[in-house]
Amino acid sequence: MVHRVLGALLRAALVVILITAPSALLPNVSADSAQVVALVAFFGAALTFFEYVSAYPGLVEFRNAPPFNRVRFGSLFVTVILLSLIVRGEAAPTVVTDFVTAIGALIGYVLDFPYSPVRLMLTALPDTSSLGEIELMREAAGMSYLISLMALSIFLIVLRIGHWPSKSGSFNVWINLPTFDPTAGGDVVERLKRDARVNTIIGFSLPFVIPAVLRSAGDLFGGLSVTNDQSMIWAVAAWAFLPSSLFMRGIAMGRVASMIEEKRRQTYARADLDHAHA
C-alpha cells in the first residue's frame, strides 16, 4: 500500500511539472495565465493520484505493463520541455536554447517537403504569418516529430528485446485494459486485432488530418498563431504525441491479441496431448 501511494504521488508530481513547465520556462507569463495553469495542474495531479493509488482499474490503460505509459509520458514531457526552450530562445537566447533550436531547425528543414506532416503543419498558420513565425513553427514541428519517432522506436525495441507485455506470458486484461469489455460479444482476439488496426490507421492519419482541421477551424475562429506561446507549444506537442501514442496503442493491442492467441494454442495442444494419453 505504501509503495502504491508513493508511486501515485511521484506520478502526480511529474504531471504537475509537465503542465507547469511552459509557464515556468517562458518569460512574461501573465498572472491570470499562471493561475489557470496551476488549476489545470492541480486537477491533472489529482486525477493521476487517484488513478494510480486505487487497486482497481480506472481509465489509464496498461497500468501494470511498463514501460508503455512511461514511454508515452516521457515523449510528451521531453517534447513540451524542448518546445518551451525553443520558444524561450526567441526572447532570452542561451547556449541551451540555441542548441535545441538548431536541432529543431535541422529536422524541420529535412522533413519540410511537399505533403509532409511538417509542411502541412506550416499551412495551418495564417496567411499573414511572418517569416520568423514560419521558422519558429518549422523548428517546433521538426523537434516534436523527431521525439515522437524516437519514442515509437524505443517502444518497438522494448517490445522486441523485453518480450513486452510480460516475460511470463500472463496479462491481466481487466487491470490493463479497463475500457475493453471481453464479454461484449465476439471473439476477444479478433476484437483486439480490429482495435489494433483502427488505432494504427488513425495514428498514421492524424499528422495529416490535424493541420487540415486547424486550417479549417482557422477560417472560423482564427488560424493557429505562434504569438500565443503556450497554445502553440501544446498544439504542436499534441499534433506529434497523439499519432505516436495511437500507433503504440495499436501495436500493444496487437501484441496482446497475439499473446492470447498463443496461449490458446498451447492450451489446446496440451488438452489434445492429455486426451491422447488418456
Image (cartoon, rainbow, N blue to C red):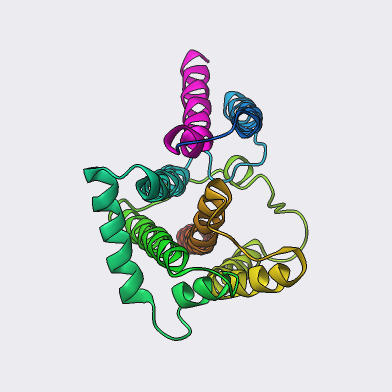
Residue lying at 53% horizontally and 15% vertically, measured from the top left: 1
Q: Position of residue 202 (x, y in %)?
A: 60, 70
| 11 is within the stretch colored magenta | yes
Residue 188: quarter of image:
bottom right
Percent x, y of residue 114? 44, 86
Residue 82: x and y in percent read: 37, 48
Question: What residue is shown at x 57% (from left), y 44% (from top)?
Answer: 176
Q: Nearer the viewer, residue 44 or 229?
A: 229
Residue range corresponding to the magenta coloring: 1-26
The vertical placement of 169 against 46, above or below, is below
Magenta stretch, main secondary structure, is helix
Q: Is residue 139 left or right of residue 129?
A: left
Between 77 and 276, the residue placed more toward the observer is 77
Front in this rendered view, residue 271 or 114: 114
Residue at image position (56%, 56%) is: 235
Q: Residue at x 31, y 51 (%)?
A: 162
Q: Is residue 35 left or right of residue 89?
A: right
Residue at the farthest bottom position: 114
Q: Nearer the viewer, residue 120 or 67?
A: 120
Q: Look at the image and tell me whether residue 169 can be seen.
A: no
Q: Is residue 125 visible?
A: yes
**Farthest-out residue, top:** 2
**Residue 145 is one of the magenta-drawn residues:** no
Q: Residue 168: x percent and y percent?
A: 39, 45
